Structures are given as structure tokens and as C-alpha cells.
Image (cartoon, grey):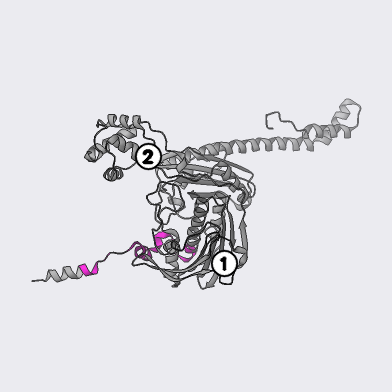
Amino acid sequence: MVDTMGVEEQEGEDHREISVAEFFEKNKHLLGFENPQKSIITVVKEAVDNSLDACEQDDIIPEVQVLIDEVGDQKCRVELRDNAIGMDAETVPKVFGKLLYGSKFHKLQQSRGQQGIGISASAMYAQLTTGEPVTVYSKEEGKPCNRFVVRMDTEANEPEIIEQEEIDPEGDQFPGDRDYYFDHGTSIEMTVEAKYTRGHHSVKNYLKHTAIMNPYARIVLREPDGNKIEYPRVANELPEKPREIKPHLHGVELGVVMRMIENSDARTVSSFLQQEFTRVGRKSAVNICEEAEIDDGRRPNTLEKDEVENLLNAADRTNLQNPPTDCLSPAGEDLLLKGLEKELNPEFTTAVTRKPAVYGGNPFQVEVGLAWGGDIADEGSFEELRYANKVPLLYKKSSCVTTKAIESVDWSRYNISQSGSRPQGPLYISIHIASVWVPFTSEGKEAVANYDDIRKEMKLALQEGGRKLGRYIKRQERMEIQEEKKRKLTSYATEMGDAIAELAGSGNPGEYESEIKRMVQKDYDPEGLK
């Protein structure tokens, strides 16, 4: 007879609970650390996202410095400094040594970070690939500078403070180039397995894309060879700060509502709908209950699953206002244009910001910017710029809803040549989704899921922008035809002058020639082309 008890005990010993940090340590590719070239972009991205969010949260016009040095074979030392408000000594080790600390997972408010994984995952990657901890300097205005050397205990998902001290930021203890020093903010230093490259998938290109969508930020990159690249600020006003809101009834999932009912202290179904969801007033709540044939005075926790489903279906048939816009912080058409113009120097730009819409109970807003001609003509053909909450997306373009939306538009209708399903020509298309919860396809936040509601909004914005660009292209084509006519008439002026003088039997042919040229070049527009 087999001793199954011993086998069961042995199997039980082989099983143990792991922390989220330990999981991602073994699956670092899920967070964007797939190879040395991509990893350095991920490290810079997470640090820049944190800096921009921190500055905007405290109404500070962002200054961000990214300093990169190569320190060995496929190893880079990355330093990032910002002028944000800084962090206190208690917060620093948790931010850089604990995954999910400060997570905005349950907060319906637009922000670059959602999961609380980013910068701490970068520190974990540095520790995993080079064995070195992260060094952090953080200084609040009017206070000493706190220096930390932090390591992450991945089994416990807790920070280990290796060194901690207060230093004089003006003294020798604060290393690095003094040209990159701010009197308040945070400086992060880490050494990671990475390869610094140039081209589309590069730190330089990522920061260029960031500068386009965030034209109120000044960003400086110092490359490993000492080359300094500045992305200047062209706007001195920040977008409106988003506010936290409650979920919207249209599209919210059944299981989510059932969980909300369990956690709610509302006494009636009507009060539950009004308290837990945005844009539901007393009248709307009563109408939804009547449509679902449920007593609005009934206690929510007595509802069966089928009744909750009926309630949701009734809500879908009820005309509710769109969610409030103050939960979102779109760039706005003015900033979109400024960003495109300063970095691309195009001949023509246009921008479209759609009204907020809803997917899965989450408000979102789509923005599109189109840039045509100018310096873009020197770069080649069509380029796509993808953004989620003002953060560039460089990878997995083919699986992103932005690409699907572009391919769903008939660009030939707007006087733009097309190859297959994609536009051609000196064209940049920038697509931005601002949302309280962006449906990324993976933890690496590299592409946005192909939701019908999102794709529809993007297509409508692209079509509106396409119409504006199409009118401009058509106008330019007509003007070129007129100019060609002028050039031809001007080239015939000498012969026409001689012929007119001969027919008139008098006059100077040169004067007739000059008059013909004057008439041809005169600023008139018979077809309304002015």
C-alpha cells in the first residue's frame, strides 16, 4: 500500500505563497524588461512618468534631466533628476523598494501611473541584473536633502534600507554635474543591464515623443557620449488637474456591481445607484428601477444576480449624462498643436479633442493631432505617434487600437494617398487616449486594447482631422495649378509683347511684356483661393 500521506505532505512543502515582487522578478518581461535595448527605455519611461506626475500634482512646471553613462558591456548608469516637491524620509524607501506602494488601482482619476509598479520595478530590475541597489536623493524645499540606498526584499516585497543620511546638497556629498541640480525634487541613480541605441526604439525618440505631448515640460537628455539634447518648453501653463470620480453605470460589469453592493452601506437600491455612480440623480435612479421592475426602496443586498443584471440592462436603456470631464486631463487642442509644431516643424497642423465617452463604466477622451509637410517631408513617409495618458507607446503598434483606428479610415477621401489601409506622405498622426483606467494589453503598458467604443471615438476624431487636412491639401493643389498657369503665362510674355505691339502697330514691346508680367503676378484669386 502506497503511503499517500507522506506524498501529500511533501507536495504541501513544495507549495508556498509568493509576493508580487517575486512574481515579477521571475517574469520581468511582462513589465517591459525583455532585452537590454528595450529595458533602458522602460527604466527612463517609468522615471519620467513619475517626475511629470509629481510636478503636475503640485502645480510645478516640470524640469526633467535624464543623464546616461555606459559603465561596461551592456550596462548603463541611469540618473534622472526633477524639480518636483520631493518626498519625506518615510516615503522614499517604500516608493523605490516596494511594488504596488501608492497604487492608483482603485482610483478613478487620470494619471500616468496606475498600478504602482513602474519605478520600483526599475529598481528591482537594476538589483536583479547588476546586483546594485538604487540610490535616491530627495529634497523638499527648505529642508535637508535625504540620501537613501535602497534594496528590495522580493520575497517579502519590502524595502531594505542599506544607507540613510541627511546631506548638504550644495556639498561634495551630492555627486554629478552641478548644471543639472535643482534646489528641490528627487534624483534617482541606478545601474542596469542595458544597451543605449539610436533610432525609433531609443531613449532619444521616446523623450521626443514625450516632449510633443507635454510641451509645458523642459526635458534634457545627456547621452553617453556627452551629447546634450534639449526639448524646450513652449507653454507655461499646465493642463487642468483631474479629480477622482465614481464609476459610470453605462458599461460597468455585473461582477463589479455585485461587489459594490456587498461593500455599500446604502439602505435602498435608489440610494445605492445615486451614491456609488456618477451622473445618477434621484429621477434617473427611479427610472432605472421602474425599467428593471425593481422596487427602488428595496435593500440592495437582497437583490439576486438576475435582478442586478436586469438593473444594469435597464441602466443601458436609460439616457444618462456623460461622465464629468474633471476626472480627465486631456492635453487640449492648443497644446497638441504647440507640441507638434515645436518638434516637427510641419507645414500644416490640426488637432481634435473629442467629448468624453464611456467604456466599461470608465470615462475616456480621445485626442488627435495631424502634422503635414514641412520638415516631415525630409524624414520620409507616414509616422504614427501613440499616447495613453500623455505617455508615449513605442512597442506593439500592430496590436494597438490606435493602429486599428487609423487603418479603418479611408484616407483617399481626404486627398491623402494610401497604401493598403495606411496613409502615405509627409504625415504624422498623433492619437492620445486620456482615461481614468486605460485598458492596456499587458502589464508593460505598451498597447491599448482594441475596444469597439474606443476605436469608434478614435475613428471619428481621425475623420474630423482628416477633413481639415484634406481641405488644406486641396487648396494647396489648386494654388499650385494657379502658380503653374502664372509661370507659363510669364514665360510667354516676351512673345506676347512682340505680337501685341505688331498688332497695334505702335508701342514698345518691352512695355507690353512688363504689363503682362505685372497682370499675371498680381495678387488676385478668381477661384476664391486667397
Between disc 2 and disc 1, whose residue precedes? 1
Q: In terms of depth relative to the viewer, which is nearer, 449 or 306?
A: 306
Q: Amino acid at mark 1?
A: Pro
Q: Which residue in the rendered view is the most extreme toward the front?
A: 142
The answer to whether 473 appears left or right of 115 in the picture is right
Q: Amino acid at mark 2?
A: His
Q: What percent of the width, then of the height, locates residue 434?
A: 47, 45
Does the magenta segment cover residue 447?
no
What's the magenta region? 12-39
Front residue of 164/198: it is 164
* Frontmost residue, 192 versus 180: 180
Secondary structure category for the residue under label 1? loop
> Judging from the image, what secondary structure is the residue with disc 2 in?
loop
The residue positioned 45% from the left and 70% from the top of the image is 133
Q: From the viewer's side, name the closer residue of 430 and 42.
A: 42
Residue 94 % position (x, y): 41, 62
- Left or right, residue 105 beside residue 39: left
The circle drawn on residue 169 is 1
CA distance for labels 2 and 1: 48 Å
Identify the residue shown where x is 38% and y is 33%: 320
Residue placed under numbered mark 2 in the picture: 248
The image quadrant that residue 274 belongs to is top left
Q: Is residue 408 visible?
A: no
